[in-house]
Amino acid sequence: MKIYIDTPENIAKMAAKRYVDLLAEKPDAVLGFATGSTPLGLYGELAQLCADGKVSFKNVTSFNLDEYVGLDGTHDQSYRYFMNENLFSKIDIDIANTNVPSGLDTSAETAAAYDKAIEAAGGIEIQLLGIGNNGHIGFNEPETPFGSITHLVELTDSTRQANKRFFNSIEEVPTHAVTMGIKTVMNAKSVILMAIGSAKADIIKATIQGDVTESVPASVLQLHPNVEVYLDFEAAAAL
Ligand code: F6R
């Protein structure tokens, strides 16, 4: 595990460079994207680099980590909408090659087909991750089996509380989501984990320096051979 600690602006630039380098070598790479506040700086960088002709996503296929159940892609809090707004509309990716789990079809077959589609596309080169205050990656909440593939989950109260800032009230926050599993994430050839802000400091310490345990889903990354962690000074403060 390589750990980089800098300002939020600099870690966004450093992570963006990984995409520029990868796509120079492999223009048709498969990328795994995340939503949430954390990747916004990186997505801004990628949009700028693309506008400047320094990187192209024309031949990229993407798979997002997760989606809320009950929200379709036109809902402004759906993760499909988030990706269209914050990244896909700002880069030259072919929208037909972007994949976000369905929040409307939650059958186990459709979920499992997501893993198969990733595999059929050649596997994810870089899976981008944020981290929840409780250590979730994707929406894999504590005690999710490390062997899990894409599946339907019930969100914990802590996650719903953390995400209510994007909704009018807690009642509006979906209770369930479809997420790539821990195994799906671990199958990626490399992982970039990003964390920003003091609220993430304790869980980052547990993730990197604590035991590998299903109680801290992100701790599984200690077992992955190719992980880069990008932290701002606040998120790194407890290390
Ligand atoms: C998003 C996702 C979540 C977030 C995490 C952190 O697709 O899967 O695991 O990465 O909840 O969210 P932010 O970045 O908003 O702190």
Image (tube, rainbow, N blue to C red):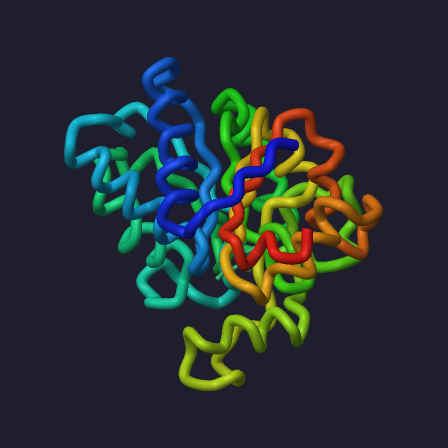
How many numbered tags mark residues here? 0
> Is residue 220 shown above or below 163?
above
| Residue occupying image coordinates x 77% and y 40% | 147
| Residue occupying image coordinates x 42% and y 57% | 79
Name the residue furthest left.
52
Could you say where residue 13 lies in the image, as x and y percent from the top left?
35, 39
Could you say where residue 144 lies in the image, as x and y percent from the top left?
76, 53
Could you say where residue 116 lies in the image, as x and y percent from the top left?
58, 31
| Residue occupying image coordinates x 34% and y 34% | 97
Choose top left, top right, bottom left or bottom right for residue 3.
top right
- In terms of depth relative to the viewer, which is nearer, 181 or 219? 219
| Residue occupying image coordinates x 47% and y 46% | 6
Choose top left, top right, bottom left or bottom right for residue 202.
bottom right
- In terms of depth relative to the viewer, which is nearer, 59 or 204? 204
Could you say where residue 104 lies in the image, as x and y percent from the top left?
48, 59
Rendered-image quadrant of the N terminus: top right
Choose top left, top right, bottom left or bottom right for residue 93.
top left
- In terms of depth relative to the viewer, which is nearer, 75 or 190? 190
Q: Does residue 98 show up?
A: yes
Name the residue furthest top.
25
Taking the image as shown, residue 191 lies to the left or right of residue 165, namely right
Taking the image as shown, residue 207 lies to the left or right of residue 160, namely right
Q: Does residue 152 show up?
A: no
> Is residue 25 shown above or below 45?
above
Taking the image as shown, residue 59 lies to the left or right of residue 191, namely left
> Is residue 114 shown above or below 163?
above
